[in-house]
Amino acid sequence: MTAAADVSRAAAVAPPRSAFGAAFDKAFEILCFSAATFLLTALGGIVVSLAIGGWPAFQAFGFGFFTSAEWDPVQEVYGSAGAVAGTLISAALALLFALPLSFGIAIFLVELCPPMLRRPIGTAVELLAGIPSIVYGMWGLFVFAPWFAKHIQMPIMMSAEPGTLWEKITTGVPNGAGVLSASIILAIMILPFIAATMRELLLTIPAQVRESAYGLGSTTFEVVRKVSIPYIRTGAIGAVMLGLGRALGETMAVTFIIGNAHGFPTSIFASGSTIASTIANEFAEATGVLHTSSLIALGLVLFIITFVVLALARLLIGRQANL
Amino acid sequence: MTALGAPRLSRRIGEGAFLVFCWLATGIAILALAAILWSLLSQGIGGLDLDIFTKSTPAPGSEGGLLNAIMGSLMMCVVAMVGAVFIGVLAGTWLSEFARDSHYGKVIRFLNDVLLSAPSILVGLFIYTIIVAPLKGFSGFAGAVALALIAAPVITRTTEDVLRLQPIALREASVALGAPVWSTILTVIWKAAQGGMLTGALLAFARISGETAPLLFTALNNQFLSLDMTKPTANLPVVIFNFALSAYDDWRRLAWAGALLIAATVLTVTIVARILAREPRRS
């Protein structure tokens, strides 16, 4: 869309006839401007309030707040490293599962899907994005976790050779709740977002470019690998970062299924915690000033991590994908 | 022809594996959706009786429903939507009609996009520090403000997008007739874009009606039916959270019924919004 398509530019050429209209124009513009600025203030307010609220914790623990994984409300000792590690590990694993799947879905919808099925399947993937995260949490804990424990966790734990590294990272309580199951639920949650963005990006490729590749005798796989992917590369990385941003900040589903244990997760089946799940579990019940403050400080850490990821995502996607 | 046109075996295998993978990936997504919907229906439908809509949340072991939670959620969502539509529509209009290519416009657009996907629990923390802590009490009002702050960026973004789709000739025609800018926007551009703007509002509503994290420490919860939004207010997501993790079977049954209720609402609203959006925009 060209920049000329706004009303104020049109009005500059043909100014309104009545004086009242002209006076109210300015007032209306200021009203709209204030609303836009309000959003900016809200984002600024989030940063400032988290920084102020978290200050006592930063002051009490100094740099140790970032390096220590000890989280003990009884002793009043708090460190963020365990929750940060849990957040990063679960989000990274989720991305590992969701990335190839969402890419496959986007290619399917654009290149392979019979036209009749395109809309129903597209809608189904969108509905997956619409399901509230608390529903994912309940489903994850009561339906997915028992199935996961029986059919995936137990066989893996049984077959692991004692004494190997593999055995070490697959030990855990066989109840299906833990870092890996949380990542799988997260992957299902972020998959539709990445797939939708990828699909929009794939649709921006000019038809001639793809069709000339097909015309040269390329197979679908070759067109995707040598034409589509290079064409959307930057935007696709952005789409992935967008999914990562969602996974990092996801709260309720993870709170249900990650097991909520403080400290570093010791294996892929062990209980862990993320920043968001720690805040969700403890904030309403936090009594001491230091406990509340440490939780807010955790929030600030999460804000910084997600802000960087989301900002990079938006810069890379640009506006072409219209999402 | 076949000797010339048929791809070599290695290419055919690569192609076949790739196609199977794409079909499989889509199948996994559909299967996940079906599995979740099936669990919701099979576990939730049994608890869905008239009591749900006529009685408040019970003590463990006694009869009850979700009336207070449903009312609280409705009140908070309505108040939140009023605020979010007001802010979002005006902000979106500014971005589309007044910001042009200004640096400030670009900054707002960028930060709005970031706000759009920022973790909702942080919005809850923010509202806690600026409303709940100073006023020394959890309230339905604080919950509504938190929800509004989540919905507003969604509405801003969709408003800007649909306004930009309106042809420049529409604006020029109105202004050439002597209409001032404000009435051009109100009566011509907003009118032309109303379908898309409604879609945006519906999607925002779908988004906030299932939000749990920002309500945990703003609206908190309330065992009783209360229409007073200055007090802690019951709401479906937090009730579901508390009941689902409880040890009582009848509480869990209510949690599943509530989850079914929320999911059905969200999915219906999403589908309606999609159908509305289908008419004027490309598929």
Image: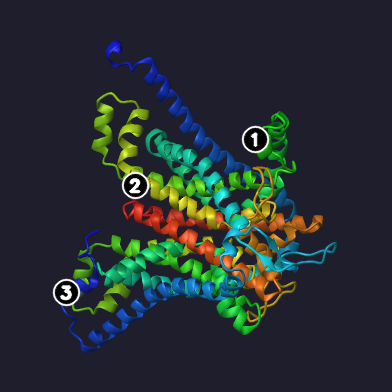
Task: Answer above or below: position of A159 versus B241.
Answer: above
Disc 2 versus disc 3: nearer the observer = 2
Give me the C-alpha separation between circle 2 and circle 1: 37 Å
The numbered mark 2 sits on a residue in which chain?
A
Dot placed on the residue nearer the N-terminal end, 2 or 1:
1
- Proximity of marks 2 and 1: CB atoms separated by less than 8 Å: no
Mark sitting on residue A234 = 2
Query: At which x and y percent is residue A271?
Result: 69, 49
Give me the C-alpha separation between circle 3 and circle 1: 76 Å
Q: Amino acid at mark 1?
A: Leu
The residue depicted at 22 percent of the width and 65 percent of the height is A5
Disc 2 versus disc 1: nearer the observer = 1
Mark sitting on residue B176 = 3
Q: Tell me the residue that label 1 is attached to.
A: A165
Q: Amino acid at mark 2?
A: Thr
| Colouring chosen for the image of the structure | rainbow
Relative placement, left or right, of A16 versus B44 is left
Given residues B154 and A90, the one toward you in this image is: A90
Q: Secondary structure at mark 3?
A: helix
The residue depicted at 76 percent of the width and 55 percent of the height is B253
Q: Residue furthest right?
A: B61
The numbered mark 1 sits on a residue in which chain?
A
Q: Amino acid at mark 3?
A: Ala
- Proximity of marks 3 and 1: CB atoms separated by less than 8 Å: no
Q: Residue furthest top?
A: B3
